[in-house]
Amino acid sequence: MRIKKIIVFLAAAAMLCAASACKNSGDNRQDSEKEEDLSAESKTASRDSVVIAIGSEPETLDPTKGWGHGSCPIVQSTLVKYTADLDFENDLAVSYDLSSDGLIWTFTIRDDAYFTDGEKLTAFDAAFTLETAKAAQGSVDLTYMESATALDEATLRVVLSKPASIFLNTVASIGIVPMHAYDENYGASPIGSGPYKFVEWRPQEQILFTANEEYYGGAPAIKNVTVVFMSEDAALAAVQAGQVDVAYSTASLGTAKVNGYHVESIASADNRGFTLPLQPDEGKSTQSGAPIGNNVTCCLEIRQAIAYAIDRQQIADLVLNGFGRPAYSENDGMPWNNPEVVIETDVEYAKKLLADAGWQDHDNDGIVEKDGLKAEFSCLYPSGDSVRQAIAMAAAQQVKAIGIQIHVEGTSWDEIMQRMFSQAVMMGWGSAIPNETYYLYRSQGAFQDDFYNPEGYQNPVTDGYLEDAMGALTADEANASWKNVQWDGAAGTAMKGQCPWVWIVNLDHVTYVRDGLSIGEQPIHGHGHGLPLIQNLHRWAWEE
C-alpha cells in the first residue's frame, strides 16, 4: 500500500533526549505543522501497517557505528540474538564454538540468508562487519578483538586478545552489513538481511520500513512501518486523534484514557539515581579542568543515610504514577544482578548513621552539621527533563527529614560535564549488556571526561571482580563475578557498601498501543524509550 506522510512521535534514550532537551519555541510550531499534515486516512489503522511514534531520531542506521546497539537493528541480522528472557539463540549462526582458552570463537553461518539486493550473506560479510565496527571505535566495544576472518563462505573465526564474556552480548546487537555495498553513506540508506527493508529516511520527520518477504526467519505480519519523531505531548495528541498505532509516553501522561487504545507498561532497567562524589575537595581537577571532590558526599555515612532515607516505592507511586519500580542497582532484573543489593527504607537507621558519625543539628535549622560543615550539596539534572527533576525533588524532600539539604538544580549537559565530579547528578543508565557495570565502576575510568564514574569510585577488590567477570568463559562464571562487584558479603558498589550511587527508581516504558495490535513479548528494556520497543517488531501482529 502507499504510505502517506504521517508524523508520529516517541520518547528516546533519556541521555540523548536530555542533550537536546532545551527546545525553543520553534519546536512547538514544527510539531503543530506536522500534526496538520496528517491525513484523515491515517486515522483508520491498516491491518498490515503500523505507525510508531518515538521521540529520538537515530544518528545512523549503520550497526558498526551503533545502530541497534543493546537491542536489535531490525534491518540487519545478527550472528546470535536475545530471547525474551535475555538468553541467546542462533540467528545467522547455526552454531558456534569457543576454544578452551577462551580466545577463539568459530561461527558456522547459515546458507539461506540473503541481503535484500539479492546477494548471499556469507562469513566474509560477517568478518568485514566486525573489523569495520572495531575500526569505527564507536559505541561498539571490540578493542579486545584481534581479528575476524572468514575461513570460507560458511565459517567465521574471531580471535580475541583476551577472554571476553561479553562477546556474545556484543555480537547480538551488531547487524551484519554487506561488504559489497558498504560505503560512507551506508548509514543513511542501509541494505541488510533482517526482517525489514529500509525504504526512506526523511531527517527530523520519519523513517519508513517494509517487510522483507524473503527473510529466512519468515516474512513479518506487519508489512509497512512508519517511525516518526516528536515530543511527548504531540505523541499523545496524535494518539487522541487516532493518527498513530503505537506511541511512547511518559509517567505523567500515561494515565490519560483514550478510546481505542490501551497502555502497556513495559518493565525496564532504565534507572534514575544520584551519583555522589566519593573524594573530598582537595583542589584537584580533571584533565579538562573540572573540579573534583565534595566534602559532604565524600562521607560514607552521608551517602548511606540518603540511600536508606529514600522511600523508593512512594516516589514510583506518586512521581511516576505507578509506572516504575524501586531501583537498587544499575541492572535490576538482569541475570547478572545480585539480589542482595536490595535495602529497605529505614529513616531511623539513616538518622543513626549520621548521629554515630557526629552529624548534629546544633543551630536547629533542620540541617545537620559536623565540624562546622553543613550537610548540604547540589544535585544537577538536565534542564527540560521533567522526570529527572521530579524524582530529584521528591528524593530531596524525603532526605530533608533526616537533616540533609539537597539543592536540586537544572542546567545544561555541558555544565553538568564540568560539575559532575564535585556535585551530585541525577543520572540514568540501564543496559542489556553487563559490561555497563565495568565502565561504571572500574578504577581507571574515574574522573574521565565522560559520564561513566564521575563520582570517582576506585577499589582494587572490585577491579579484580570486574576483570574476572570480563574474562570468564561461561555466563554463569561471569554473572557470579558481576554479582560480587555489587556485593561480596562484605563490600561492593551496592548502597549497603561504598554507595557511589543512590539508586531510586526504574522507569517503566509507558506505551500507548492501539487495541487489536499485539507488540509481542517484550524483554526487559534497557536505557532509552525507543529502539528497545521495536527490537521484536517482526513478532508484532494485528489480532483477528
Image (cartoon, rainbow, N blue to C red):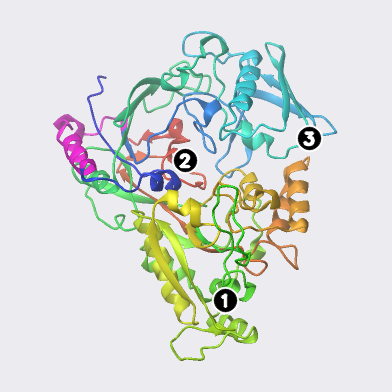
- Residue placed under numbered mark 2 in the picture: 532
Residue appearing at x 48%, y 17% in the figure: 184
- Of label 2 and label 3, which has the lower sequence position? 3
Q: Is 461 situated left or right of 246 in this image?
A: right
Please determine whether, in this image, residue 493 is positioned above or below residue 414.
Answer: below
Residue toward you, 540 or 463: 463
x and y percentages locating residue 381 in the rendered image:
42, 58
Residue appearing at x 47%, y 17% in the figure: 191
Does residue 344 appear anywhere in the picture? Answer: no
- Residue placed under numbered mark 3 in the picture: 162
Q: For residue 47, what is the image quadrant?
A: top left
Q: How crowded is mark 3: few (under 14 residues within 10 Å), some or many (20 or more)?
A: some
Residue toward you, 510 or 191: 191
Q: Is mark 3 on a helix, strand or loop?
A: loop
CA separation in Å, label 2 and label 1: 35 Å
Q: Is 64 situated left or right of 240 in this image?
A: right
- Of label 1 and label 3, which has the lower sequence position? 3
Magenta residue span: 26-50
In front of the other: label 2 or label 1? 1
Query: Is residue 525 rendered magenta in the image?
Result: no
- Of label 2 and label 1, which has the lower sequence position? 1
